[in-house]
Structure formats: structure tokens, C-alpha cells
Image (cartoon, rainbow, N blue to C red):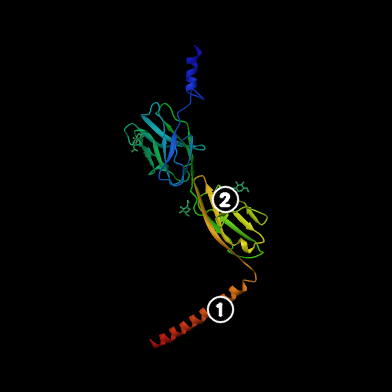
Amino acid sequence: MFPVPLLLPLLLAPGSAAAAPGVTARTLAPCYSADLRPAAGSLVSAVGCTVLLTAPELRGSRAVSWEYRAGSEEGVILSYGFRHPPNVSRLYENRATFNESSLSLQVVLQQGDSRLYRLRAQEEATTWFHLHVVEPLSEPQIVGNSLVKAGGSTKLVCNVVQGKADAYWWKKNGELLVGNERIRFVENTTLCIVRVSISDSGYYTCVVSNAVSQNETSFLLKVHHSTNVVLPVVLTCVIFGVLAGVIFWCQRRENSCGKCW
Ligand SMILES: *[C@@H]1O[C@H](CO)[C@@H](O)[C@H](O)[C@H]1NC(C)=O
Ligand SMILES: *[C@@H]1O[C@H](CO)[C@@H](O)[C@H](O)[C@H]1NC(C)=O
Ligand SMILES: *[C@@H]1O[C@H](CO)[C@@H](O)[C@H](O)[C@H]1NC(C)=O
Ligand SMILES: *[C@@H]1O[C@H](CO)[C@@H](O)[C@H](O)[C@H]1NC(C)=O
């Protein structure tokens, strides 16, 4: 019977008897990309979204400060002394909201807010909380030749314009594109097709994703037979010839009208 009461405190505080209290955070709605579930220890959220950081009650919380750390750089986000309005650091000015009753902090996220956060009171502080702030991806751009001769080769490059992609993949006419001896994916961003055939014509979509977003762009690839090119060229010449004639005629008419006026 005797050892049980001695063991009890250890069982109630697994890990360490001296475990410091931790911050809990969650992304607030509306945020179209990030997960809205609360998290302890670390959270991934998106630029433009609002995160709510909460801490359990600390000893000596008549004066508290929310602090950040990034590498060797440390700073105070805001400090709050009993009954005085909180002082907010320039870094978080106009985007940090402090709740004086719960001591929680709300921040509208910017790029560069990926830092460690904690709440410090007079007598104790929480452990550091990791916040990862990821920029949602805009539509990528596909650069390449849209008109390719059968038998030739082509290269489509998918460029991410805004944000950083963790993964790239390609679809053709809506279906996942799998590589083979003619179709290769080079350095994630580039699709290479060699010995192009008419059946390679279609809509190619580049899909990019990261922890908070997915976006895509499509590109129409047209493959033509080398001989088929004669007819469109002839047609184009005829059309341009006719247009040129019409313009010339209009100009003459205009000139003659000008003279009449
Ligand atoms: C807030 O700033 C004022 C002026 O710089 C200073 O006097 C005051 O002590 C600060 N309050 C806290 C809680 O740090
Ligand atoms: C501050 O926190 C308390 C307790 O969590 C909550 O009831 C109250 O609505 C919050 N105030 C604001 C302005 O968010
Ligand atoms: C893709 O990016 C565009 C801006 O380029 C944005 O308006 C759109 O919401 C994004 N789509 C998704 C699904 O995130
Ligand atoms: C791109 O591909 C290389 C290997 O070819 C890989 O190491 C890297 O993580 C990839 N990067 C992205 C953003 O997919």
C-alpha cells in the first residue's frame, strides 16, 4: 500500500514532473486553406489567416508578455500589465489582438511569422510553440510551345508564381499523367515528351501543392503532321491576302472621302 501515494504524482504528470504548461493554437474561420483543428506544440497555418494562441493559467499572471523566438532572435510581441492597455511591438502592430481576460493572442498571419511563441508571466512561462506559416499557392504558369510537329519533342515547364510548392504532378485531359519511355518528368517542374504523336494533343494540367493549398493551370498542346501544315499556311495566306486587300480598299475609300470632305 505504501508506495502507491508516492507513485501517484508521477502517473498524473507523465513525462516529467516539472513539465511546463503549453500553448494551444488554432486557425480561425474563415480560412479556406488551413486546418481549423486546435493543436498543441505546433501548428501549420496560412498567410492571411488568423491564429488564436491560448495558454493555461500561469503563476504571477498579473503582468504577462507574449514572446517570440526565431533562431537567436528573441522579442516581445506584446506586454500587458494589470489594467493598462497592452503594448504591442511594431512587428505585430495592427494585427495582434489581446484578450485581457483569457490572456490569449490573435494574430493575422504574414509571411515571416514562422516563429516560436510563448506566454510569460512573472513566475513561469509556457514552453515554446512552433507556428509554421505557409503562403497559399497561386495558379502556376505553364511555359512551352503550344504547337508541335509530330515526331518532334516538346517541353512544358510549370512555374510557381507565388508561394513555394512541395509537390508537382501533371494531368492530361483530366487524368493523372504517368511517365513512360517517351514522357518524362524532369526536376519536378518540367514535362518532356519526345517523338510526339498526334495522340499527345490535349489539355495538360500542372498541379502544385503545399501544406495549405493546391492550385493548377492547363495548357492546350496541339500536334500537327508536318504535311498538314501546308493547308493552314495556305489558308492563312489567303485570309491575310483578302484582309490586306480590304484594308487597302478601305484606306483608298477613306482617302477619297477625305478629299470629298
Ligand atoms: C508600455 O509602454 C510604456 C511606454 O513605453 C511603459 O511605460 C510601460 O511600462 C509599458 N507597459 C508594459 C506592460 O510593458
Ligand atoms: C476573451 O476570452 C473570454 C474567455 O475565453 C471570452 O469569453 C471572451 O469572449 C473573449 N473576448 C473577446 C473580445 O474575444
Ligand atoms: C489559385 O490561384 C488563384 C490566383 O492565381 C486564386 O484566385 C485561387 O483561389 C487559387 N485556387 C485555389 C484552389 O487555391
Ligand atoms: C524536386 O525533385 C528533387 C529530386 O529530383 C527532390 O529532391 C526535391 O525535393 C523536389 N522538390 C519539390 C519541390 O518537389
Q: Nearer the viewer, residue 126 or 85?
A: 126
Q: Which residue is mark 2?
A: 168
The residue at 52%/56% (across/down) is 217
Asked whether the beta carbons under mark 1 and mark 2 sit within 8 Å of each other, the answer is no
Q: Nearer the viewer, residue 165 or 180?
A: 180
The residue at 57%/54% (across/down) is 175
User: Residue 249's x, y, as percent?
Assistant: 48, 83
Q: Judge: label 2 CB < 8 Å from ligand 4.
A: yes
Residue 117 in the image: above or below residue 225: above
Q: Which residue is mark 1?
A: 238
Q: Residue furthest bottom?
A: 260
Give, as a three-letter code, the residue at label 1. Val
Instruction: Report the quarter where the C terminus lies.
Output: bottom left
User: Residue 213's x, y, as percent?
Assistant: 49, 48
Residue 68 in the image: above or below residue 18: below
Q: Is residue 126 left or right of residue 221?
A: left
User: Residue 129's x, y, as percent?
Assistant: 47, 35
User: Residue 199's x, y, as percent?
Assistant: 62, 62
Ligand 2: quadrant of the figure = top left
Mark 1: few/some/many CA within 10 Å (<14, 14-19, 20+): few
- Disc 1 from disc 2: Cα separation: 44 Å
Q: Residue furthest left?
A: 83
The residue at 43%/87% (across/down) is 256
Give, as a three-letter code, the residue at label 2. Tyr
Q: Element type at marker 2?
A: strand
